[in-house]
Amino acid sequence: MVGPAACRARRDRAHGRLFVQRKEALNAALDLLQFHMLRFWLIFAQATTIAVAGLFVVSTFHPEWLPQRATTGPQLAVVQQAAPGAGGGASGAPGGRASLHEAVARATPSVVNVFTSKDIRTPRHPLLDDPLFRRFFGDPGGGETQRANSLGSGVIVSPNGYILTNNHVVEAADEIEVALPNGRKLVAHVAGNDPDTDLAVLRVDAANLPAMTFGASDALRVGDTVLAIGNPFGVGQTVTSGIVSALGRVGLGINTFENFIQTDAAINPGNSGGALIDAQGNLVGINTAIYSRSGGSMGIGFAIPVSTARMVLEQIVKTGAVTRGWIGVEVQEITPQLAEAAGLGAAKGTFIAGVLRGGPADRGSVKPGDVLVAVEGQAVTNPAEVLNRIAVLAPGTQAKLTVLRKGETVEVTVKIGLRPKPQ
């Protein structure tokens, strides 16, 4: 039989076990809650960090994506804002700003760099030619040979591989290499040259080359925009802009036949043989010379008109050489002193100072003292015009010359001869 004390003890043990079980359940619930709270906090912290990082990136690189906060204080009022594309700029220029990009993009693939090399014999010391020196030491032989390199520019004028450049760029060169803007390099040879105009035609073994379109140099006007493209100082293909400063420049002593386009577009050493283009990207001249006291551009450059270049190109491609007309006369410009001394009065034209005996003009009854007024009906006023007018006439053809002789107008017929090669 169990006593009251034993019953109380049994009840106390049951209550203790129940308390322990409840405490363990509570601790388990707290642990679970703590775990979920920690997990929620980690997720919140990571999300906040990502959001702050995203806000920083957007505010740094694309602030326009963020809403603008209202500001207080004075505001800058925009009175007038030009619409994109408005204004009188060139077609296709962003914001209406004038641009010659289309002309440049059209022409630059046709302008090449020309690299030449040749052997130059250095002169030996004069002492080596002294008879006494040679008696004791013998003949030491000639001077040393050095390899000289030079550079210039050229213009592709035919898809079949013809390139125009200056004669002085390739003169006496042993090796010629042209480099296209895309980096392609080709070996070239001289198909023909014309020292009288300082032009040369190169030929490369290639097809489907980007040939430049010929413009009309006769349509150029003083003040027209032109661009010079070349390889100045070997720095790489360069484009400079300017205007036509003058036309028909003669008497500069650069070439035998002169009819230069003068421009203030920067032309520097290395530009020789490069292109002078108009605002549409058409070839109007071949850059050839500059006036400079320092060796660099001073805003006075000269280009050979494309009409002359085309005539030289066509003759060289067809016959391998350039032929010109010639009549065998010496002409002078009529100055006030010459007019007074020769009794020419107010005669306009070119004074014939001499006639080559047996030459075309002599056989055509042209006499010294005549004043040449016109060639084939075209007036001539200076020796350069006479030279150019006669040169374009084909040898063997008949030409009518108008001269003033003792105050009377006389027309004579002269059979054009072949101009001798320069010595």
Image (cartoon, rainbow, N blue to C red):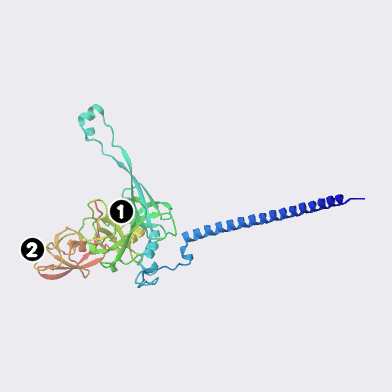
Q: Which mark is residue 342?
A: 2
- Tell me if 309 is positioned left or right of 56 in this view: left
The image shows residue 271 at horizontal and vertical percentages of 32, 55
Q: In which quarter of the image is residue 153?
A: bottom left
Tell me what residue is drawn at x 84 percent, y 52 percent: 8
Which residue, as the protein is rendered here, is positioned at the far right?
1
Percent x, y for residue 7?
86, 52
378 sits left or right of 56 in the view: left
Mark 1 sits on what residue?
Answer: 167
The kind of residue tagged 1 is Asn
Alpha-carbon span between mark 2 and mark 1: 40 Å
Specify the label residue 330 is tagged with: none
**Label 2 amino acid?**
Ala
Farthest residue to the top: give it.
Answer: 136
Name the residue nearer the viewer: 244 or 365: 244
Q: Closer to the camera: disc 2 or disc 1?
A: 1
Instruction: Determine whether the residue tagged by mark 2 lies in a helix, strand or loop.
Output: helix
Q: In this view, does 276 lie to the left or right of 403?
A: right
